Image (cartoon, rainbow, N blue to C red):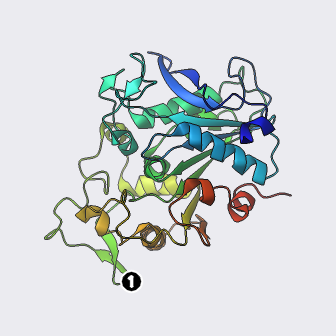
Amino acid sequence: MASALYGGLCSANPYVLRLGQDAPYSFLAYANAHMTNASQASRAVVLVHGVRRNADDYFETGLQLLSEAGLDGRDNLLLSLNFLTAEDRRAGKDMPLWARDKWMHGTASEQGRSGIEAFAVLDDVLAYLADRKRFPALEEVVLIGHSAGGQLMQRYAVLGQGDAHLAGQGIAVRYVISSPSSYVYLDGNRVQAGTVGPASAADCPDYNRYRYGLEVAPPYLSRQHLSAEQLFRRYVARNVTFVVGEHDDNPEHPVLDRSCAAALQGPNRLQRQRNYLRYEAFVSQQWGVAIHHPQITVAGVGHDAARLLTRGVVAERLFPRH
């Protein structure tokens, strides 16, 4: 198993993180180091799983990614976060629990420790990593979300504010958005027939409501009191990389979002990512701010995290060897 390469924790035994400062709560994460000890890692790689909530499998994928990139596990902390529902075997009363896939929206937990936003979990993970008593040598955090986790990560890259915890400590943050079903847009424009322009709400009245747009935004965003342009300018400044498989083009994929709001973004994940990048370029011209968010299309791969994230091209682009 890949975990043996790094002497990490067995993937069958997740670590229980204590997150949150004012009202601490428990959260599961699979790790390649014992989190009770101070770590000398200079980088943390944080993975968010897909709709199956199989963080153990993503942990193994993360270890393979580190190995493919030639990274030493002693210098690279790997955390695979586990968002849970009340039906999951490892669910606990002191853990935030969501109804099925609602965690991917970034919104609040409904059971267990209810009222904890999934966005706030990511904020708290970054605050945890920013603690210099735990991680005195940390220089960088790489957040990677795939599929449903990619939906959460894309929205967090736009709406999240946890990187402020790290900026004060001189720790850089990177966001990797892998193969989500949909994206959050900042206005009513969409790519249609190869052109970016206003979409009609006649056939899809809710196409611009959250989580596809900013209308009826969740409290996490409302509390920030930022305009769409302010959000975009902050987002532009963030280090964001997009990843998708060349063959992730099945419009009938069983877990593809096929709502009318998602369909307005494109027929499949591959095209939706390309359309979003075109949209970003359009908005950057509108507001006069340069944007550079690189994109990786991985040849010969469909919607498969284990194959996609462990390809040499992904490892090299995410962790280039100097």
Q: Quadrant of the C terminus?
A: bottom right
Viewed as shown, does residue 231 lie left or right of 143?
left
Q: Quadrant of residue 275?
A: bottom left
Q: Residues within 10 Å of mark 1 (few under 14, many from 20)?
A: few
280 over 21 or under it: above or below: below
37 over 226 or under it: above or below: above
User: Which residue lies most toward the right here?
Assistant: 322
* SS state under label 1: loop
**Residue 215 in the image: x percent, y percent?**
25, 52
Can I make out residue 287 in this image?
Answer: no
Which residue is disc 1 drawn over?
A: 194
Residue, x 49% and y 57% (percent of image)?
A: 233
Q: Quadrant of the N terminus?
A: top right
Q: Quadrant of residue 319?
A: bottom right
Q: Quadrant of residue 223?
A: top left
Residue, x 29% and y 63% (percent of image)?
A: 258
**Residue 261 in the image: x percent, y percent?**
26, 62
**Nearer the observer, 184 or 222:** 184
Residue, x 34% and y 67% (percent of image)?
A: 252
**Residue 70 in the image: x percent, y percent?**
82, 51
**Nearer the observer, 194 or 310:** 310
Three-letter code for the amino acid on which mark 1 is drawn:
Gly
User: Which residue lies most toward the left here?
Assistant: 202
Viewed as shown, does residue 54 lie left or right of 42?
left
